[in-house]
Amino acid sequence: MSAIDEGRLSASAHQILPDAIDPNLPNLYRGKVRDNYDLPDGRRVLVTSDRLSAFDRVLCCVPFKGHVLNSVARWAFEHTADICPNHVLDYPDPNIVVGRRLDILPVEIVVRGYLAGATSTSILTMYRAGRRQMYGQTLPDGLAANQALERPMITPTTKAADGAHDEPLTADAILARGLLSEDQWRQVSETALALFARGQALAAERGLILADTKYEFGVDAEGTIRLADEIHTPDSSRYWRADTYQQRLAAGERPDSFDKDVIRDWVAARCDPYVDEIPEIPPELIWKTALTYVEAYARITGQTFEPPRPSPPVQDRVLDALRSFHG
């Protein structure tokens, strides 16, 4: 990234969106990253904040993060619409998407192409603990951290309430517990693998590796399964730089990434993030992460990121956009 680009970004580094609370909009639901409103006409307004979430909690806010996530998701939705319909109706602001309100399926679909991850549900964490059977599948002995799997695997989890932990699932458990019907499970698993293949191909064109990603699906009023939330963003996905991957793998080093693992790993090295109070994250690490998100946007989409202007405050801009939904 050039000094001129970073200078423009630095001028707007104070433009952080911690939340977007409009008391005049109905049915507010606050997720870890998004503030959502369900409108009476069946639309859902989703505002992507700059909150960074990991370990089932919010760790900090990162400048430009919400803007980047919403923009990457928009690009990826447009490049996968032929595989699966999605929830998107409109983008009235860089941090806002308006979508169809869906009944979200109670299973989170994670597709993994590599032995990676840092959370309790990641296959690398389980593998290092000595487990070889996970998510109804068996991995061989002798795999190295961040090594490619023989084929991508789906690792579904429950969708835990705020403050609770996602729990690993198997296909048999999903069907036995009635979380999804057999037809629904077949459709979302086949669709997820097709979406992941498309995402990996698009990433490869940009010199990136899509190592793993998360999908959420929901059912609309007509019974159609649609993609919800976000897709192939640096938050929902793990991207690595392809040109240094083999060298770092051979050296036993962590791949160069475009995801929030930098902060996540820093926190995990200093406490039990599921239990302990989170230590204050250094401002320079947060800024490095902001630049990583911006670079990820450019690498993933092939487009130049336009940061918000230094004024007016981005929160004022977002709240002004939300006023258009007042009844």
Image: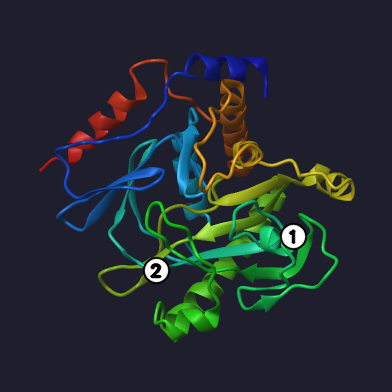
Q: Residue furthest front?
A: 276
Is residue 185 shown above or below 246? below
Q: Residue at x 74, y 40 (%)?
A: 256
Q: Residue at x 50, y 14 (%)?
A: 11
As drawn, is 308 to the left or to the right of 45?
right
Q: Residue at x 44, y 18 (%)?
A: 14
Q: In the image, which is nearer the foreground, mark 2 or mark 1?
A: 1
Q: In the structure shown, which secondary structural element does the residue marked by tag 2 occupy?
A: loop
Residue 29 rendering spot, x and y as whole percentages:
27, 49
Pick whichever of labels 2 and 1 is earlier in the sequence.
Answer: 2
Which disc is residue 224 wearing?
none
Give the quadrant of the N terminus: top right
* Crowd class of label 1 (few under 14; some 14 to 19; many from 20; radius 10 Å): few
Task: Please tell me which residue lies in front, 215 or 125.
Answer: 125
Task: Please tell me which residue lies in front, 33 or 327.
Answer: 33
Residue 4 rendering spot, x and y as whole percentages:
62, 15
Q: Which residue is mark 1?
A: 128
Looking at the rendering, which quadrant does residue 225 occupy? bottom left
Residue 19 rendering spot, x and y as whole percentages:
33, 34
Give the quadrant of the C terminus: top left
Are the residues tagged 2 and 1 within 8 Å (C-beta)?
no
Residue 43 appears anywhere in the view? yes
Q: Residue at x 61, y 43 (%)?
A: 300
Number of labels in the image equals 2
Task: Please tell me which residue lies in front, 311 or 166.
Answer: 166
As drawn, is 234 to the left or to the right of 21?
right
Q: In the structure shown, which secondary structural element does the residue marked by tag 1 occupy?
A: helix
Q: Which residue is mark 2?
A: 106
The amino acid type of the residue labelled 1 equals Arg
The amino acid type of the residue labelled 2 equals Pro
Residue 325 rendering spot, x and y as whole percentages:
18, 41
